[in-house]
Image (cartoon, rainbow, N blue to C red):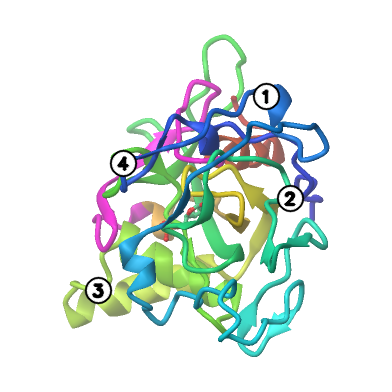
Amino acid sequence: MMSSVAAKPCMHVKCRAPMYPRDNISRFPVSDEQVSWSKAYPEYNPPDHTSPSVLAKPVWADPDFRDPAFPQPKWNDLDGKINRKSHSGPYEIIDKVPRNPVGRTGVCGRGCLGRWGPNHAADPIVTRWKRDCRGNQVKEGISGKPILQFVAIQRRDSGEWAIPGGMVDAGEAVSVTLKREFGEEAMNSIEAREDEKVEIEEAIQDLFQNGKEVYRGYVDDPRNTDNAWMETVAFNFHDETGRSVGRIALNAGDDAVGVRWTDLSSSVKLFASHELFVKQTAMLHNSHW
Ligand code: RP5
């Protein structure tokens, strides 16, 4: 197996956009030079924002641990069924809450993320070779390399194209999250007929047996804050012959409003850090990028 991309990013960009997504909150401005916590920024005064949906205490959200009424969780550790370990190594606890390991984001609190500290996700990158009507691999004109395609979904929240990933539930194995999210978002398994469900299940079961990890670590997700951030493990599942998932009709479901096979190239624009994960996948297969 190839080694996946190093888990220690030193910069984030998408989580410093002027507006915090969904809630219409302005982020405190943070330039590239002001990201690092080691750089003094005495004027830094980010809004403390946690979305009403998180404050409503759904099962996937933590309580406010800044309130002494709540016992402190096991930071940097497995906390019951909740994984509070970071793929990037130990993070700091400042004023009772975790601090973003990459640096300032312009917002503190949790925003719309449920967990203080790392919020764990998993991303399935399902690929096949692009083929012409005779079944021959299509090569890109200039690089001469074969073109890889991956399954992209269009996110309901931002309209951006993305890998069909999702949050790892408390106590859930990453392998289960990968299959569940792909089935729900790219094949609409939730609304499929029983006979369709069997076909989807078989195709996914077969293909998802042999994945290769292409990334593990911090995600530059627009929802990140100074105290809560996304992390993921991205796996590539490759359908070499195109006869497994490659031949099943895609059907957007759950949090996705669109789904399609997308050619991999450096011009692809995706949600959060997903371009990095698909680039790693192209490198793995020595395909056109
Ligand atoms: C990203 O958010 C991850 O890479 C993953 O794709 C996604 C999980 O969040 P939801 O799609 O469940 O909102 O950071």
Q: Position of residue 40 (x, y in %)?
A: 78, 32
Residues at discs 2 and 1 in contact (Cβ within 8 Å): no
Report the disc number at residue 50.
Answer: none
Distance CA(mark 4)–CA(mark 2): 25 Å
Q: Which residue is mark 2?
A: 101
Q: Which residue shows up at 16% across the image and 77% down it?
A: 193
Q: Nearer the viewer, mark 3 or mark 2?
A: 2
Instruction: Please tell me which of labels 3 and 4 falls first in the chain.
Output: 4
In the picture, measured across the screen, residue 247 lies left or right of residue 106, that is: left
Dot 3 falls on a residue whose secondary structure is loop
Disc 3 to disc 4: CB gap under 8 Å: no
Earlier sequence position, callout 1 versus callout 4: 4
Distance between the Cα atoms at labels 3 and 4?
A: 31 Å
Amino acid type of the residue that numbered disc 2 sits on in the rendered structure? Pro
The residue pinned by badge 3 equals: 190
Lateral position of residue 90 relative to residue 95, left or right: right
Above or below 268: residue 49: below
In the picture of the structure, the residue carrying the numbered disc 4 is 24
Image-based side of 156 in relation to 219, left or right:
left
Residue 267 percent location from the top left of the image: 49, 21
Q: Earlier in the sequence, mark 2 or mark 1?
A: 1
Mark 4 residue element? loop
Q: Residues within 10 Å of mark 3 (few under 14, many from 20)?
A: few
Please state which amino acid type lies under the numbered disc 1: Asp
Q: Which residues are magenta?
A: 247-273
Mark 4 vs 2, N-terminal side:
4
* Residue 90 place in picture, x, y as percent: 82, 63
Relative to residue 8, is residue 66 depicted above or below? Answer: below
Q: Is 108 included in the stretch rendered in magenta?
A: no
Residue marked by disc 1: 32
